[in-house]
């Protein structure tokens, strides 16, 4: 790679415009380590730990039965957790479902408790399901035909709606986001907008639902997998380009919600200067790309880029450690604090 400085020029002798890396703030938003939510998470994590132990023994037995020349690497606890973290483990196993519940509750810890109590299903937490639920809401938030009250009525059909007070109260990240939006809306510049990204679509949907209820005067948009890239014949204003154009052109505060997977690359938002990542991205590259959606050439406003981290969530902690090492480390999955907490509670 060629080193460039302020005097560097291209092949035609023209100066090369460069930017310094984005200034990223990692904000600690840990869940409470007491109460019903923590108890449920410890119970679910303990089940994941037991599943890892069982899977390891099964793979060791299978490894022993193979001929020596066909054994391959010796299975270890680390190799089992790597399969789990990478999504290669069988989704039919209950241990994998338990891990998925922990993963999808990075933004809203009470989700694990609600799932554990069987008030919502694993299917309702999946991306395909939440994106379909979101479609009916986002169609009512089309910039050219914005209908907040109708969208809020649609939110009430969502399976998470009746749990919204528990989700709101038990989510330090949402409380932080709420305070930051309130702060943004007090600024005199109406062009200040906020971009909110998450890893899990269920986090995006719940965030949209709560913000619609909490901020009646704030415009919101949400781009998910079901929002088409190109406008359909039935609604030419309902597409990703129309949403992004509206964000760039409207002179009033707006919040734009999406996921790292959908809009981390190729979406330039010079008119959006506040960024909050509700969950730690899956890779360091994705984290930098997400930050650069607002840290762009042409940006005229000071930027504030924040990633909210709950290192009490084992899934999020593993991604934080990996990203701190810029992807060079295999962080694994440390469930010991949950197992110890569960054991202490049972002893008491």
Image: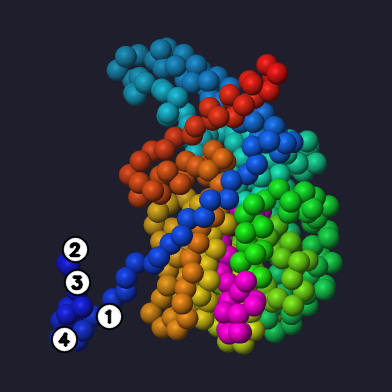
- Secondary structure beneath label 1: loop
Relative to 304, does residue 189 appear above or below in the rendering?
Answer: below
Residue 343, image quadrant:
top right
Residue 151, image quadrant:
bottom right
Q: Where is mark 4, residue-wise?
A: 12
Q: Where is mark 2, residue-wise?
A: 1
Identify the residue at horizontal 83%, vertical 58% (top origin). Answer: 157
Relative to 194, does residue 206 appear above or below in the rendering?
Answer: above
Tell me where residue 49 appears, x and y as whole percent. Answer: 56, 25
Question: Which disc, if any, is residue 17?
Answer: 1
Identify the residue at horizontal 79%, vertical 53% (top origin). Answer: 165
Tell me where residue 268 appears, x and y as whole percent. Answer: 46, 76
Alpha carbon of mark 1 to alpha carbon of mark 2: how far? 17 Å
Is 223 displayed left or right of 1 in the figure?
Answer: right
Asked whether the viewer can see residue 95, the reply is no
Q: Are marks 1 and 3 in contact (CB under 8 Å)?
A: no
Q: Are marks 4 and 3 in contact (CB under 8 Å)?
A: no
Q: Earlier in the sequence, mark 1 or mark 3?
A: 3
Location of the N terminus by quadrant is bottom left
């Amino acid at each position: 790679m060629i080193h460039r400085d302020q005097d560097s020029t291209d092949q035609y002798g023209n100066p090369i415009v460069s930017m310094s890396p984005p200034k990223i703030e990692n904000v600690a938003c840990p869940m409470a380590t007491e109460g019903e939510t923590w108890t449920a998470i410890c119970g679910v994590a303990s089940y994941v730990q037991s599943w890892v132990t069982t899977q390891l023994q099964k793979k060791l037995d299978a490894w022993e039965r193979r001929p020596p020349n066909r054994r391959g690497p010796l299975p270890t606890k680390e190799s089992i957790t790597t399969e789990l973290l990478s999504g290669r483990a069988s989704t039919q196993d209950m241990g994998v479902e338990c891990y998925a519940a922990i993963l999808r509750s990075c933004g809203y810890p009470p989700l694990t408790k609600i799932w554990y109590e069987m008030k919502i299903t694993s299917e309702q937490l999946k991306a395909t399901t939440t994106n379909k639920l979101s479609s009916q809401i986002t169609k009512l938030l089309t910039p050219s035909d914005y209908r907040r009250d109708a969208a809020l009525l649609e939110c009430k059909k969502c399976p998470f709606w009746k749990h919204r007070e528990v989700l709101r109260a038990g989510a330090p990240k949402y409380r932080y986001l709420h305070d930051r939006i309130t702060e943004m809306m007090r600024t005199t510049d109406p062009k200040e907008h906020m971009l909110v990204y998450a890893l899990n679509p269920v986090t995006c949907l719940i965030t949209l639902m709560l913000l619609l209820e909490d901020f009646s005067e704030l415009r919101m948009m949400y781009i998910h997998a079901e929002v088409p890239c190109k406008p359909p014949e039935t609604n030419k204003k309902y597409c990703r380009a129309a949403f992004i154009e509206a964000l760039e052109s409207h002179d009033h505060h707006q919040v734009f919600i999406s996921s790292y997977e959908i809009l981390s690359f190729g979406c330039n938002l010079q008119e959006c200067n506040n960024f909050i990542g509700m969950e730690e991205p899956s890779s360091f590259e994705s984290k930098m790309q997400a930050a650069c959606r607002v840290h762009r050439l042409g940006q005229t406003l000071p930027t504030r880029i924040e990633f909210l981290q709950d290192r009490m969530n084992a899934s999020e902690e593993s991604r934080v450690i990996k990203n701190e090492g810029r992807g060079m480390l295999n962080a694994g999955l440390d469930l010991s604090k949950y197992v110890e907490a569960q054991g202490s509670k049972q002893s008491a």
